[in-house]
Amino acid sequence: MKVSLGQKILSRNEECASQNRDFFNKHKIVCLNVISSPGAGKTSLLVRTITDLRERLQIGVIEGDIETDNDAQKILAAGAQAFQIQTKGACHLSAEQVYNALKMIDAEKMNLIFIENVGNLVCPSAFDLGEGRRVVILSVPEGDDKPAKYPGTFAGASVVLINKIDLIEHLDFNLQRVLADIHTVNPNAKIFQLSAKTGQGMEAWYDWLKEQIET
Ligand SMILES: Nc1nc2c(ncn2[C@@H]2O[C@H](COP(=O)(O)OP(=O)(O)O)[C@@H](O)[C@H]2O)c(=O)[nH]1
Ligand SMILES: [Mg+2]
Ligand SMILES: [Zn+2]
């Protein structure tokens, strides 16, 4: 039987993803894989979320970037445990990297673990990390055509966060079009409009998080 290299890589990833999933289930941890383009506001969203919820929830973050540990430093400063994966060129995280990173934080004590994936709307969505759900962030300055251009990523989201809503009046961003395009590729996605900078709209996101943890 011939097995192509691509198939092997994917099945190795599936194996590790299922180990991660078992770990999250066993310890009743909600794990969210956060995907967006670079600069959409993943780290800013996590910092504000941690700042607002850290009294009530144990939150851990696994950070993925090509280089630097800047984002992990910001998470630590916000008061949560964090571990930075540096992918050294790879444009997405693998389940094995997450598996190893879970050992670097007190993962079993967490209620909520965020994985900030490498900034990229293409391939991260092809790699299962064993997460419970996916959160895709689209920020207003990126433009209103992105859900139609990157349907695969939006199709896999449980939640789409439209971030930087504070900037909407300064840009040509057709919100109705975005809502309709997300609905076309993913009729079940929850959509929240918010600003990680001003805090506008964050409560609905927090309510959704609490719902995930309670169920
Ligand atoms: N105006 C505005 N700027 C934001 C918002 N969220 C993030 N930013 C800015 O966008 C830039 C990129 O944010 P960052 O969180 O690093 O994005 P990441 O690359 O997705 O992690 C930073 O300069 C943030 O201050 C927002 O809601 N409104
Ligand atoms: Mg970041
Ligand atoms: Zn990639």
Image (spheres, rainbow, N blue to C red):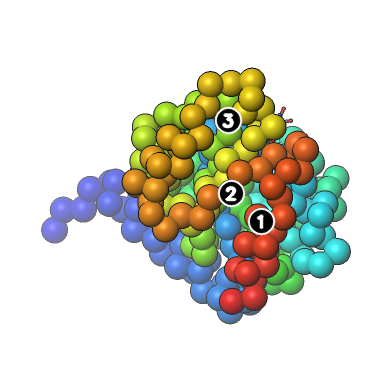
Picture layout, residue 119 above or below residue 187: above
Q: Viewer-proximal residue, 35 or 140?
A: 140
Q: Is residue 191 visible?
A: yes
Q: Is residue 129 visible?
A: no
Q: Quarter of the image containing the N terminus?
A: bottom left
From the viewer's perspective, tell me whether residue 165 is left or right of residue 78.
left
Upstream in sequence: badge 3 or badge 2? 3
Mark 2 CB lies closer than 8 A to ligand 1 = no
Residue type indicated by callout 3: Val
Q: Amino acid at mark 2?
A: Phe
Label 2 Cα crowd, 10 Å radius (few <14 / some 14-19 / many 20+) = some
The residue carrying mark 3 is 140
Proximity of marks 3 and 2: CB atoms separated by less than 8 Å: no
Answer yes or no: do the residues labelled 1 and 2 have beta carbons within 8 Å?
yes
Query: Where is mark 1, residue-wise?
Result: 204
Looking at the rendered structure, which numbered label has been put on residue 175?
none
Q: Mark 1 falls on what kind of element?
A: helix
Label 1 vs 3, first from the N-terminus: 3
**In the rendered image, the vertical position of residue 153 relative to residue 215, given as above or below:** above
Q: Secondary structure at mark 2?
A: strand
Label 3 Cα neighbours within 10 Å, binned few <14 / some 14-19 / many ≥20: many
